[in-house]
Image (tube, grey):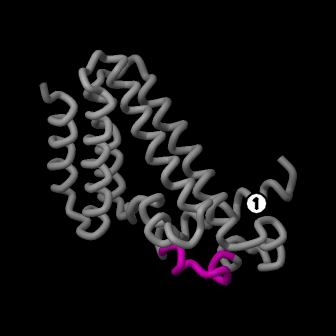
């Protein structure tokens, strides 16, 4: 990896981190430059605009999240139930550690849906990709109405993310997990 690529990756990583804590509009270029050690001129040289930097950060985070989800869903040592509940376990851990600040994609979409097509496109693509992967998992396990159930279950999961962001109440995770499994196992 070249020095330039390393600087870009650092800027992208720090942007995700900062935006998750302070929001996308609440994360200024001054804050990004302070955290990365890069000048504004360098960041603008690499990304042209703050919105392009945010879109790149979201794409990078999406790629990593999808790799992790694919690894989880393809793990043959886990049962279907374990695969479906692992994301809830990760949320519990994030809340317990004080590291859950909401869903990056929901936050970005709410701030940029009417303003930036690229950012909102990354967000909607991520959410639809998760639904597609859950649907494929359900089909592989002979769950009837897999597509419909994947959409409903992910609606429950995304509702949890929004509500949990506001309340930080861990009991909500248990409630949503039960709802998620009930949706998938319903006849």
Q: Residues within 10 Å of mark 1 (few under 14, many from 20)?
A: many
Name the residue at 45% across, 43% down.
Answer: 128
Q: Is residue 28 left or right of residue 19?
A: right
Q: Main secondary structure of the magenta part?
A: loop
Q: Position of residue 61 (x, y in %)?
A: 57, 52
Q: Is residue 29 magenta?
A: yes
Foreground residue, 103 or 121?
121
Q: Quadrant of residue 177?
A: top left
Q: Which residues are magenta?
A: 23-32
Q: Position of residue 155 (x, y in %)?
A: 29, 48
Q: Is residue 181 left or right of residue 11?
A: left
Name the residue at 34% across, 42% down.
Answer: 87
Residue that mark 1 sits on: 8
Picture layout, residue 176 above or below residue 132: below
Foreground residue, 96 or 85?
85
Which type of secondary structure does the marked residue at label 1 adopt? helix
Q: Position of residue 127 (x, y in %)?
A: 44, 47
Picture layout, residue 40 above or below residue 123: below
Q: Quadrant of residue 182?
A: top left
Foreground residue, 10 or 114?
114
Picture layout, residue 122 above or below residue 137: below
Which quarter of the image is occupied by the C terminus? top left
């Amino acid at each position: 990896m070249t020095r330039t690529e390393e600087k870009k990756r650092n800027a992208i990583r720090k942007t995700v981190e900062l935006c998750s804590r302070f929001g996308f509009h609440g994360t200024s270029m001054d804050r990004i430059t302070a955290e990365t050690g890069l000048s504004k001129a360098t960041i603008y040289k690499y990304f042209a605009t703050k919105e392009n930097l945010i879109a790149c950060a979201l794409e990078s985070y999406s790629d990593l999240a999808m790799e992790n989800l694919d690894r989880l869903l393809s793990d043959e040592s886990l049962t279907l139930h374990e695969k479906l509940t692992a994301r809830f376990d990760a949320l519990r851990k994030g809340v317990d550690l004080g590291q859950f600040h909401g869903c990056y994609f929901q936050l970005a979409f709410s701030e940029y849906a009417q303003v930036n097509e690229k950012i909102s496109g990354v967000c909607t693509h991520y959410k639809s990709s998760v639904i597609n992967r859950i649907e494929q998992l359900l089909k592989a396990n002979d769950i009837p109405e897999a597509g419909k159930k994947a959409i409903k279950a992910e609606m429950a999961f995304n509702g949890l993310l929004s509500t949990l962001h506001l309340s930080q109440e861990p009991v909500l995770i248990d409630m949503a997990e039960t709802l998620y499994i009930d949706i998938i196992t319903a006849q």
